[in-house]
Amino acid sequence: MKTLNDCEKNQKVRVVKLHAQKDLKQRLISFGIMKEAVLEVMEYAPAKSTIEVRVGKMSIALRAREAKLIEVESI
Amino acid sequence: MNQAEEKACPVIAKHIKVALVGQPNVGKSMLINSVSNAHLHVGNFSGVTVDKTEVLFDYKGYHFTVVDLPGTYAFTDYSIEERVTHNYLSGGGYDLIINVVDSTNLEKNLQLTSELMSMNKGIVIALNMSDEAKKEGIEIDAPYMSELLGIPCIKTSAVTKEGIENLLDAIVEVSAQERQESKLIFSEPVEEEIAKIVGYLQKHKHQASNSYRNIAINLLKGNKKTYARLHDDPIWTELQPILIDATKHIELHHDSDDIKEAFAEEYAAFNKGIITEVVKQTQTQEQKTITRQIDDILIHPFFGIPIFLFLMWGLFQLTFEIGSIPMDWMEAFFGWLGDTVGATIANEDIRSLIVDGVIAGVGAVVLFVPNIIILFIGIALLESTGYMSRVAFLLDGFFHKFGLHGQSFIPLVTGFGCSIPAYMSARILKNDRDRLLTLFIIGFMSCGAKLPVYVLFAGAFFSAEMAGNVLFAIYIGGAFLGLIAAKILKLTAFKGADEPFVMEMPKYRLPSVKLIWHTVATKTMMYLKKAGTFIAAASMLIWFLSNYPHNLELKEEFETKIELASTQEKKNELKNELAVLHLEQSYLGSIGKFSEPMFEPLGFDWRMSVALQTGLAAKEVVVSTLGVLYALGDEVDEESGSLVDAISKNISFASAVAFIVVIMIYLPCLAASIVFTREAGGIKYFFYLFTFTSIAAYSLAFVAYNIALLFS
C-alpha cells in the first residue's frame, strides 16, 4: 500500500482511502482530504517530520504519522 | 452589559440578529469592521464565551446585532472553537446566518456552506475577498449561484468596502421573507432514502417546525438533536428500521463504513457541480504564486529555522533599541510631574503619598509602554501575515520531541505578549492532555509585563549594546526551560497518546494596518488601564506599608545627630541611614524581613522579597515596588539619578540573576492565574501550577545564584 508519506516532493497523487480513526478522518475531510481528492506534496519539514500538501487551493500541514494513514495512488 | 445593549437599541427599531460564520482566514473580522464602520458598540460576551464578539449597529431603520463566531472548517467539533460555533448555531437564538466565504477558494469554503444549509435558518453568502479573486482571474457568477443554491450570494470586499450595502440589503430582505427550502441536491441513492423518510413522515402527519426534507437529511447525517426530538415519538419504532436500511444503502454506495464520510463526499460532489457552473478561471495559474515563492525561502528545510530565529532576535532588538528612545523623555516627564505636583501639596504625608507612591509607581509602569507596543506589533504581524502557521510547520518535529504539539507554538508565542490570550488560544488544541500541558508551559514564555523587570535589570548590569542580546537570551532561555519542563511533565503527569497534527497553511497576506492598530491599541489600553487603576492602588498600598508606622523616636534621634554633624557629607550619610532604618521597621519591611530567611539562599534582600510577593498581583508591580522601595531609601542621596542606578548599586550581580530566574518562572499574575484556572478546568490545576512553578523557580534560582557567584 502506497501512502502519502512515501511520495516525492512535487509529486501529485490521488487519495484511495483514509485509514484514519473517526475524529482524524473528519478533520482530514473538512480540509478536503477525502477519497478521489488530488494531493500535491509541496514541502517536507526538516527530518521529514511534517509534510505540506496542497489540496485544491489550500495548503495543509500534517505529520508523517498522519500521512501514513492516507492511502494514495500515483496519477 | 445589558444596559449598554438597551442604550444602543431604541425601542422602535426592528431587530435582526445575525450569526457571522465562516472558515478561518476568510477575512471575517475585517468584514465586520467594514460593515459596522460606526463602531457603535463592540464588546465581549461575559463569562466563558469570550470568544464570541457582538457588534451592534443601525441600518435603514433596522437594528443589527452581529455575533462574530470563531472560524470553523466544518462541524466536526474538533476543537473547542468549533464546538462554540456549532453549539451557538444549533441553539437557534438568532434570525439568520451570514456565511462569509473566500472567493479565491470557493470549493473548500462551500463545504461549510452545505452544512449550514441543514440548519433550517435563512442564509446570506458573502463572497468575500472579491477584489483578490478578480486579481487572480477568478470570475464568479453571483446571480446564477444565488439561483442554484436558493441563497442570496453577494460579492463583498472588506478591503475596498465593495458590496457592504448590498449585503445588508440582502439580510433585510431575507429576514422579511418566508424561509425557502435550500436547494441542496444529493446523489440518487441518498435522494431515494430521503424521499422514503419524507413519505413516512407525511403519512403519519408528523408535527415539526422544520421541513420533512430537513428532518430526513438530519436523521441520515446522524444529527443528535434531531434524533433526540424523534426518539420519544411513537413513530420511532417504525422509523428506526427505515433509517438503518437507509444508512446501509448510502454507506454501500460510498464504499465507506462512516456515514459522515459519505455525506462529506455528497457535499463535495454537489459543490463541484456548483463550481463548474458559476466559477470561471480566466487566467491559467501556471506560474508560481507569491505565497509559493515566499514559502520556498521561509519554510526551506535548512534556512527556515535560522530565518525564524533571526526574525525573533530582530524583534527583541527593536523592542529594546527603539523602545528606549522615548523612555528618557518619559522618565524626565514623570520627574517633572512629581516635582510640580509635589510643590502644590503642603502636607508632607499626602505629598509623599502622591509623589513617591502614585506618581513614582505608575510612572515606572507607564515607562515601558513603548517596549510593549513594539512587542505587540511584532506578535500581531506574525499572526496576521500567516507566518505563524509556517513556524508551526517548521517546529512541529522539534516540539513533538518535547511532547508538545506544533500548534502549541501559537499559544506559546502569544504568551510572549500576554499570558491571558495565550491561555485562551490554547483552545485550538483538541486533546485535553495536550492543552493542559501547553497551559502549564505558557508561563515560561515571559509576558510583556515581565519585560520592564528584564529591561530594568539588563540596563543596570549590562552596557546598552549588550542589553538587547541579554533580553533575547532571557526570553529564549525561558522558552527552553519551558520545553524541558514540558518533557518532564509529559513523561510524568501527562502521559498518553498524541493529538494528530493537521493544520491549514493560509496564503500570505499583507497585514491590515487598521486591524493591527486595533489589536495593539486595545492591548496597550488594557495595560495603561491596569497602570491607572490596579497598579496605582497597589502603589498606594505599598507606599503606605513602607511609610508606616512612623517611628518618632528614631526620627528625633537622627535629627539631633544630623544637626550636630559637622560636614554636609556626614549629614547626607545620616539622612540616608535614617531612611533605610525607617523602611526596615515599616510594615513592608516587616513582611520582607519575615520572608527574608526563605529567600536568603537566593541572595535576595528584603526589598527584593517584597517585590516578588507584590508581583503575584501583577508583574508590572514588581518594578513599581522596587521604584517605591529604592526611591525612598535613596531619597536624600543626591547622586542617585534613576532606579537603574539604584539597582546596580544595591543589588549584586548574582542576586540579580537569581531574581530574573524567579521572575521568569514563578506564578503568573492574578488575572492570568484566574484565566488559567478557568481554561484548565478547575481550582486544583491552579494549585498544581503554584506548586510546580514555585519549586521550579526556587530551585533553578538557587542554582543560578551559585553559578553566578562563582563567576563574579
Image: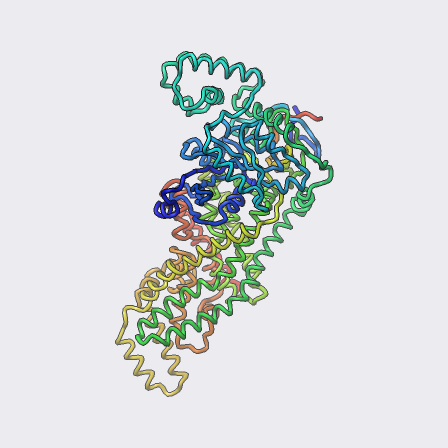
Quarter of the image where one finds residue B613: bottom left
B49 or B79: which is nearer to us? Answer: B49
- Residue furthest to the bottom: B566
Q: Residue B359: x, y in percent?
A: 40, 67
Quarter of the image where one finds residue B318: bottom right
Identify the residue at horizontal 68%, vertical 25% (top origin): A73
Q: Residue B294: x, y in percent?
A: 67, 46
Q: Residue B17: x, y in percent?
A: 43, 38
Q: Residue B451: x, y in percent?
A: 49, 58
As drawn, B477 above or below B229: below
Can residue A65 be seen here?
no
B282 or A58: which is nearer to us? Answer: B282
B626 horizontally vs B290: left or right:
left
**Colour pattern:** rainbow
Identify the residue at horizontal 50%, vertical 58% (top origin): B372
As drawn, B472 above or below B439: below
**Number of numbered discs:** 0
Identify the residue at horizontal 30%, vertical 83% (top origin): B560
Can residue B358 be seen here?
yes
B56 or A68: which is nearer to us? Answer: B56
